[in-house]
Amino acid sequence: MTAFNIRVAKIEDIPFILEGIVDAEFSGSRVFPYQALFGLDVEATKYLIRQVFEEELDGQEWHLSQFRILEVGNTSACCLSYWTEGANGTGSGLLKAQALAWILGNRWSEASDKLNVLKTMQLPRLTGAMQLECIYTKPDFRGQGLVGKLIDHCIAEAKLNTPNLEQAEIQLLGSNEAAMRSYTKCGFLNRAQASSSDAEILNLLADNTRISLVKQL
Amino acid sequence: METNIIREKLSGIFNQVFQCGAIEITDTLTADQVEKWDSLTHLTMIAEVESAFGIRFKLKELTGMKNTGDLVGLVQEKTANLG
């Protein structure tokens, strides 16, 4: 087994985290949602996400202190972000949308029709459940079970800080079969899924189905 | 600006954005109690409020808002600062 170390993310990790977020947004396809929705290329999207990080909004995925990094030697191999859904009374979807709308201004308003299409496959996250997002493994380190180690570590850490946590949830697109296999190995089971019949959805996302996987803690 | 005037204006905006008919703006009103109040319509409502009152919220103010009472309070504070 590869030796590894897991730690809280630092400012210097942001480029690696952004690489992971962008990779997750592509979700193994050629469709880049931020290009399709707001006309932002990869670099502009990274800049946008950096701006959200700077706002330090608790309770949504793009907050540096919620990221954990798994290192092999001195190399960052995996990352993920975790939080408790709705812990501050507001859902992560609304918090993230508020941040994006506030930063993007007119670009957000102009995308309202497309955002309404995305709404057709919205899957509400479980309030009070641990949420895991932005899960990424660098290509060179895939197939070694490292992401499972990172997930297990984060669940143990979250349970230590919040002993009454009962569930952990991961949401992903249906087309992301490799990730789904990996999470199933970690004990996650299919809880629910939402599919959109709007043909426009495939111009915005890699798949028209969103899946919620849950693990009982 | 007096809170009853703010509430009256907000009621009109809520009716227009959430298509909820005449609605009483109480301090404890939240998204859970209005059918079409979701993350997207919420942001449309905020944009309409900013335009109607000539104000601009900070991001931290938006994310700290827990109910309509908080919204009324913020609008009152910001319109007072307009002089």
Image (spheres, coloured by chain):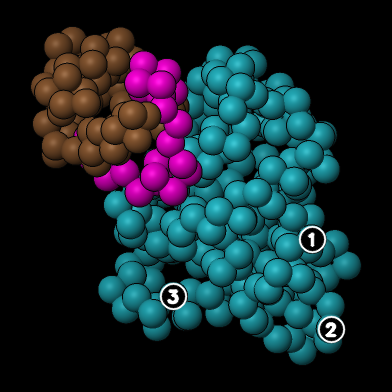
Chain colours: A cyan, B brown
- The residues bearing labels 1 and 3 have C-alpha atoms spaced at a distance of 25 Å
Q: Is residue A135 above or below residue A33?
A: below
Pointer 1 or 2: first along the chain: 1
Which callout, 1 or 2, points to the residue nearer the camera?
Answer: 1
Q: Is residue B39 visible?
A: yes
Residue B64 drawn in magenta: yes
Overall secondary structure of the magenta stretch? helix
The amino acid pointed to by label 1 is Pro
The reply to whether the C-beta atoms of the residues labelled 2 and 3 are less than 8 Å apart is no
The answer to which quarter of the image holds residue A31 is top right
The amino acid pointed to by label 3 is Ala
Which residue: 48% across, 26% down? A119
The reply to whether the C-beta atoms of the residues labelled 1 and 2 are less than 8 Å apart is no
The chain to which mark 3 is attached is A
Point out the stretch of residues depicted in magenta. Answer: B47-68
Q: Which disc, if any, is residue A74?
A: 2
Give the quadrant of the N terminus of chain B.
top left
Which residue: 25% across, 33% down? B76
Which residue: 23% across, 16% down? B9
- The residues bearing labels 1 and 2 have C-alpha atoms spaced at a distance of 15 Å
Q: Residues within 10 Å of mark 3 (few under 14, many from 20)?
A: some
Q: Is residue A61 visible?
A: no
| Badge 2 element | loop
| Badge 3 element | helix
The chain to which mark 2 is attached is A
Pointer 1 or 3: first along the chain: 1
Give percent across and percent down for residue A191. 42, 49
Q: Which residue bears the numbered disc 1?
A: A15
The chain to which mark 1 is attached is A
Q: Which residue bears the numbered disc 3?
A: A158
Q: Are marks 1 and 3 on the same chain?
A: yes
Give the quadrant of the C terminus of chain B.
top left
